Amino acid sequence: MTLFEQKSNEFISRHIGPNEAETKSMLTTIGVSSIDDLISKTVPASIRMNHELNIPAAMSEHEYLKHIKEISLKNKVYANYIGQGYYDTIIPSVILRNIFENPGWYTQYTPYQAEISQGRLESLLNFQTMVSDLTGLPIANASLLDEATAAAEAMTMFFNFLNRQDHVERPKFFVDTDVFPQTKDVLLTRALPVGIEVIEASYKNAMPDSSWFGAIVQYPNDKGSIEDYREFVSKVHAAGAYVAMSTDLLALTLLTSPGELGADVAVGSAQRFGVPIGYGGPHAAFFAARDEFKRNIPGRIIGVSIDAYGNRALRMALQTREQHIKREKATSNICTAQALLANMAAMYAVYHGPAGLKNIAKRVATLTQTVAESIEQRGFELVSQNFFDTIVVKTGELAAIKAKAERQQINLRYIDSNHIGISLDETTGIDDLYDLINCFENDKDPVAFDIEQDEDLQHIPVSLKRHSPFLTHPVFNTHHSESQMMRYIKMLENKDLSLNTSMISLGSCTMKLNAASEMIPLSWAHWSKIHPFVPKDQAEGYETIVSELSKYLCEITAFDACSLQPNSGAQGEYAGLLTIKRYHESRGDKNRNVMLIPISAHGTNPASAVMAGMKVVVVKALENGYIDIEDLKAKAQQYSAILSGIMITYPSTYGVYEETVKEITAIIHQHGGQVYMDGANMNAQVGLTAPGLIGADVCHLNLHKTFAIPHGGGGPGMGPICVKKHLADHLPGHINEDVSGNNAGSKKLKALYLLRLMDRPVSC
Ligand SMILES: Cc1ncc(COP(=O)(O)O)c(C=O)c1O
């Protein structure tokens, strides 16, 4: 190897632990002569990949950083006023440096072992307390994947609470017209397979009856309007149904809480609490509910307990990993969520405290009021006079305003040809208002004018002003200096085991690498400040990454097309199963709904299958953990006419590469089924074999397990799916994908399965 080749190979030697002598000693201990010998004895020859992966040669870390910087510069950082659930935010430097950029926080695994996780458990408990206080609801979970998924979880929780699995008396779910469009799409996607009927109308004219099980409204709504839902909530309750409110934590510092308005559940995104927009995620969603739902809340809940010595101790409690116990009776498949981002949001609240948060909210509201009044003075009309940070302007001059905004590198939200949305955030300063207001000046060039500030917030209705206290716990009222905050973060970090303490010997699926070089670009503005709904030509860097990554994942899996949308492995399962379902339906096979699942499968597999409207039939395992082929054959035969497919994990959860895998996939195909491969153990396949080589049709990859996404104490997750050619047309799409980045004239191309805003399906 030349000196220069050595440089490119440096990454491997820096990040793969065992040296030559140690490797030799391990091989001798298990009685094999070399790594090749070990592989040939464990990976069946019939499924071995007999070529090198066709992906570019490795770079050195220095070259990589230069490369990723160049790509980032293809993204354009404009001033964003698009809103729609995503707002710029100021990450306090003490949190950026000590959490976001600190392996003591981003390399931790899911806190199953409470004794080595008290630090991150306390931070997640802070997240729950913050959400519970602000929403006015007594119990909250430790984060979900995104706002839209959280809304869908609320819908299915209500549905299952009021209906029995075999007897649906209340099929209807009401969605107010002014819920965010992306949330509506995910609700529709999740509703269809399980037989929920979604009705969309204005809450003002709604007539709830006994066919409803629930409803959702947005507070403040999609157009920024602050509506009083009290009467609507009473009507829904009188009909025996429940209400979820999608809401905004910053607005709630000034507004009466959903709990006080009568809501049963509140959901939303905690992104604007110090988490970068990053072209749409990952961000922590939140979910809070009334006490009666405590055994039905999706995701993880951190509880206060006592240890063996009687001391206060924290642990995951209640619905933890509910799929593992309830399996096909589980009502949610959420496993990995967004722990790292939830920790950042919680620390943002700890650092600012209740008064600090209120000040931020007041500043945003004051500037929004200033913009609104200035625009009205220029002859425009607003859709609502009650608002916090978002206004919608009625106009017949959209094209001229848009042209002027673009000249000033400003993105507004072009809702349709007559409406423009403007959302402010904590990064907006008084100076920015001149450019913004100038877009509405009846003049081609910017003109000079004065701005009058009025700190008396006149657009928050008196009847909806917040009077109840929040964040009264000492943790939110102590750590307001940088030194104190730094010490608090360090104190929690020191209680935990992370990769900066030692190796963590948990199962194969979680053993992964987070090189510092892979993490560094995340905080660069050209990646972190891009709004998910910017025009495509402002996000060319992201598009490059999306198409390159999709291509590499197709090569690694031996598949033909890829969607990066799912936010976790379990969401990948769900998206993959819907892809299979749509494929069968497209061929007129509408009754294929039986999914065979080995008894040894991870709990999310049966949970996802039920969510996709499938019936789970369990396949037995032999004593050595192998799938029982005779049982499989019998069941495939029995359900042949209605077989949708099988879900297998490879290598299995016992860690074995079953030689029978090709026979298994052939049996399923003979009976017209499709093969879903759970890719959680993909670590053990890359470069040696591939899902496409074992006969699978679709698989997910947990990028937080096999590739570079940090595990972060239980998230962020990322579960892209790859498929064979015949399934490519059935991959998820996105409501905004056909409109060059803004939603003027948006029309839906495909049903949206799941929400991961940055990505569109890519054929490779
Ligand atoms: C075998 C297997 N399948 C699926 C999943 C679910 O993936 P995620 O936690 O990313 O939703 C896991 C995660 O623990 C797993 O180990």
Image: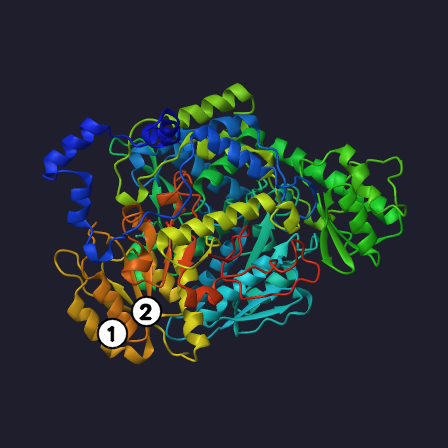
Is residue 716 visible to the viewer in this orientation of the structure?
A: yes
* Marking on residue 13: none
Quadrant location of the N terminus?
Answer: top left
Q: Residue 231: where, in percent of width, then height?
A: 65, 62
Spatial CA span between label 2 and label 1:
9 Å
Dot 1, crowdedness within 10 Å: few (<14), some or many (≥20)? many
Taking the spot 23% from the left edge, 77% from the top edge, the residue there is 637
Taking the spot 55% from the left edge, 34% from the top edge, the residue there is 69
Which of 730 and 234 lies nearest the eye of the viewer?
730
* Left or right: 219 as drawn, with respect to 398: left
- Residue that sits furthest to the top in the current view: 483
**Which residue has dot 1 on it?**
636
Amino acid type, mark 1 = Ala
735 versus 257 height, above or below: below
- Which of disc 1 and disc 2 is earlier in sequence? 1
Q: Residue 260: where, in percent of width, then height?
A: 59, 51
Q: Assess whether mark 1 and mark 2 are in contact (beta carbons under 8 angstroms).
A: no
Quarter-wise, where is residue 428 in the image? top right
**Which residue has dot 2 on it?**
645
Is residue 330 visible to the viewer in this orientation of the structure?
A: no
Numbered disc 2: secondary structure: strand
Dot 2, crowdedness within 10 Å: few (<14), some or many (≥20)? many
Amino acid type, mark 2 = Gly
Numbered disc 1: secondary structure: helix
Q: Residue 658: where, in percent of width, then height?
A: 19, 57
94 versus 563 height, above or below: above
Which of 581 and 314 lies nearest the eye of the viewer?
581
Which of 367 and 13 lies nearest the eye of the viewer?
13
